[in-house]
Image (cartoon, rainbow, N blue to C red):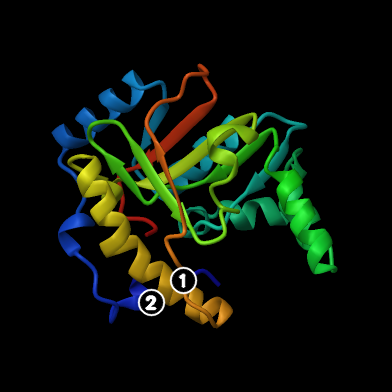
């Protein structure tokens, strides 16, 4: 079962960096993201986000995803696992490998999926995306390895600028992910590997599905 923010109400975060934006602020973010080469699809709900993601994935492609509370919340991870689709599910293949070393190698190979799905921890209204991970397995495919990247994010991750995006990573995403990691793995998380995605130079490679809801960390 996925762990949402509601499961960690006792975790202290900076609530001011987790508010939904105004319509004007969201429109500014979309305009600047698109100017930086990202395709943006804005939807009103998690259900619409799932429909949008499914529509973005052609039949026959290989699909992999990093851990993402947002993907769990919109129902994508369950949809993929159910198998009612025409994609090659690399995630299932990786976690069917029993040997730990072989599974790690398979996870690295899966970074080159036709479509890699995930989320980000912050979106600057100036058009940059910020994401971090402890191991790098969640964000390793983002810059280059995957042929296509589909990111899904709640609009609550929109903040004024890049400095505020770093603050959100430290003061919202990290405390919540650390608590989740303690529950899931028995050890805390860390902002060990951080990506600032300033621009996409390959037209059509990276799509951000932006949901007018509070989702994820």
Which residue is situated farthest in the front direction here?
192
Secondary element type, mark 1: loop
**Residue occupying image coordinates x 64% and y 34%:** 146
State left or right for residue 89 relative to residue 146. Answer: right
Label 1 close to label 2 by CB (< 8 Å): yes
Placement of the N terminus among the 4 image quadrants: bottom right
The residue under label 1 is 3
**Residue occupying image coordinates x 18% and y 44%:** 21
At which x and y percent is residue 217? 37, 59
Q: Quadrant of residue 144?
A: top right
At which x and y percent is residue 188? 47, 76
Question: Can residue 83 be seen in the rendering of this structure?
Answer: no
Q: Nearer the viewer, residue 7 or 114?
A: 114
Q: Nearer the viewer, residue 93 or 131?
A: 131
Check the image and report above or below for 148 versus 186.
above
At which x and y percent is residue 7? 38, 77
Q: Which mark is residue 7?
A: 2
Q: CA distance from mark 1 to mark 2?
A: 6 Å
Question: Can residue 110 be seen in the rendering of this structure?
Answer: yes
Secondary element type, mark 2: helix
């Amino acid at each position: 079962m996925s762990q949402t923010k509601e499961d960690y109400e006792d975790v202290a975060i900076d609530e001011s960096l987790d508010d939904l934006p105004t319509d004007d602020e969201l429109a500014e973010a979309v305009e600047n993201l698109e100017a930086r080469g990202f395709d943006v699809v804005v939807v009103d709900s998690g259900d619409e986000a799932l429909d949008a993601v499914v529509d973005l994935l052609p039949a026959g492609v290989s699909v992999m995803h990093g851990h993402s509370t947002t993907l769990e919340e919109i129902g994508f991870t369950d949809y993929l696992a159910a198998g009612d689709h025409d994609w090659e599910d690399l995630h299932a293949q990786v976690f069917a490998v029993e040997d730990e070393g072989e599974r790690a190698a398979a996870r690295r190979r899966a970074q080159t999926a036709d479509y890699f799905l995930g989320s980000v921890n912050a979106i600057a209204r100036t058009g940059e995306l910020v994401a971090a991970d402890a191991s790098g397995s969640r964000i390793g495919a983002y810059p280059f390895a995957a042929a296509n990247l589909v990111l899904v994010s709640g609009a609550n991750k929109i903040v004024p600028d890049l400095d505020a995006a770093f603050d959100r990573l430290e003061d919202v995403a990290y405390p919540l992910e650390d608590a989740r990691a303690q529950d899931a793995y028995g050890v805390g998380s860390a902002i060990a590997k951080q990506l600032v995605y300033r621009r996409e130079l390959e037209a059509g490679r990276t799509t951000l599905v932006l949901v007018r809801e509070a989702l994820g960390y």
